[in-house]
Image (cartoon, rainbow, N blue to C red):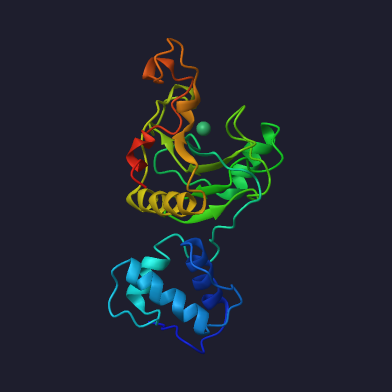
Amino acid sequence: MEIYKIGSKGEAVKQIQKALAGAGLAVVCDGIFGKITMEAVIAFQKENGLTPVDGIVGPATLAKLMPKGTSTAFSIKKTKRRITDIIVHCTATPEGQELTMKQLEEQHRKRGFNGIGYHYVVLLDGTIAPGRDIDTIGAHCSGYNAHSIGVSYVGGLENKPGVPYKKLKAKDTRTAAQKEALFNLLSLLKKTYPNAVIKGHRDYSPDKNGDGLIEPWEWIKSCPSFSVEEYKGI
Ligand SMILES: [Zn+2]
């Protein structure tokens, strides 16, 4: 197992620095593990109850800093757009079926979007794949795109062989890895945008009886096929 400490250099160090920055710590993401990075690691270790608090990134600190699915290609970049909403979607893919980013892009282009409509997509194995650039307004929730970030997971539909796609019912198909990755992603987003609210796509349906709650019978669609209330405490 690799250990990163003062003097370490390279892409892995850069990823660690990005994760530290994503956790709200002041670091320069230059790929050089210096004193500032060490201090950020110490602060991170203290904040997360990791021992020893030594400023060295070993397996435990690394796992906390970059949980499964959030390593390598993933980091949170802060956009200049004003963000009020973090909106969770599903890709409406049958359970257990993977959807590659290329396939998703094709689907979205067919719908007339300029590429993938979401900013982040959580694949079946918990990998967080970057979608459209965070500075670009998404195409995922009509009327709310300008000030939101769109997050989606692959799934959201039951898988019944022989049943036509359009007849498939909504289902929370998140794998354990996807649940974990969504939790991590939403936590990082919430840290980056503390004033933004986390909601599911279906929560934007019109409140037909005006009681302030969007009830199941009012949902235009079921996306993301689970209640985002689950992430309320983030
Ligand atoms: Zn949706």
* Label total for image: 0
Does 130 sit above or below residue 164?
below
Left or right of residue 96, residue 117 in this image: right
Give the answer, above or below, for where 208 lies relative to 177: above
Above or below: residue 69 compared with residue 14 = above
Q: Quadrant of the N terminus?
A: bottom left
Q: Is residue 209 visible?
A: yes
Nearest the camera: 164 or 188? 188
**Front residue (pair 60, 23):** 23
At 32% across and 79% down in the image, what residue appears?
Answer: 53
Tell which of 135 and 39 is nearer to you.
39
Give the image location of residue 113, x and y in percent. Answer: 69, 36
Left or right, residue 22 beside residue 179? right
**Residue at point 42%, 9% (across, down):** 209
Q: Quadrant of residue 219?
A: top left
In this view, the residue farthest toward the top is 209
Residue toward you, 32 or 89: 32
Q: Residue lying farthest bottom?
A: 7
Q: From the top left corner, tell me how far across and down residue 231 is, in percent.
A: 36, 42
Q: Picture coordinates of residue 49 (x, y %)?
A: 28, 69
Residue displayed at 46% across by 53% down: 191
Residue 150 to residue 3: above or below: above
Residue 159 location, quadrant? top left
Residue 140, located in which quarter of the rendered image? top right
Which residue: 37% across, 43% down? 174
Residue 62 appearing in the image: no
Q: Residue 183, image x and y in percent?
A: 38, 50
